[in-house]
Image (cartoon, rainbow, N blue to C red):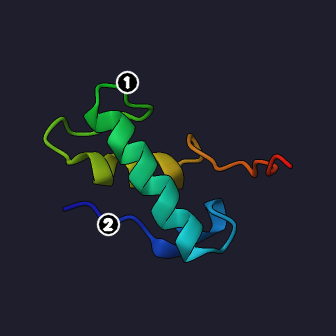
Amino acid sequence: MVYVPLEKLLDESGSSVYKLVILASKRALEIAEGQPKLVDVNSAMKPSTIALHEIAEGKVKYKKVKAEK
């Protein structure tokens, strides 16, 4: 099992655990549906772990979307 430091993940997600969880879950779902991986990892890794690696390396980021009025 590969360790992904929580501090680095929080730095990349704006210091919000909530944003980190949402970002990782959405990206993991995309990977599970067949989207290409943005990092070189073991093919046996689960999509959620791959998503965390992508976030830690800065390949996946969140962006704030303005609410429509």
Mark 1 in CB contact with mark 2 (< 8 angstroms): no
The residue depicted at 59 percent of the width and 47 percent of the height is 58
* Residue 64 in picture, x, y percent from top left: 75, 52
Assess disc 2: are there few (<14), some (14-19) or many (≥20) residues with their C-alpha within 10 Å of its C-alpha: few
* Residue type, numbered disc 1: Pro
The residue depicted at 62 percent of the width and 74 percent of the height is 16
Q: Which residue is tagged 2?
A: 3
Q: Residue furthest left?
A: 44
Q: Which residue is tagged 1?
A: 36
* Left or right for 54, reference 32: right
- State the SS at label 2: loop
- The correct choice, above or below, for 69 with respect to 43 in the image is below
Gap in angstroms between the C-alphas marked 1 and 2 = 22 Å
Earlier residue among tags 1 and 2? 2
Say which quadrant the N terminus sits in: bottom left
Return the residue nearer the eye: 65 or 9.
65
- State the SS at label 1: loop
Assess disc 1: are there few (<14), some (14-19) or many (≥20) residues with their C-alpha within 10 Å of its C-alpha: few
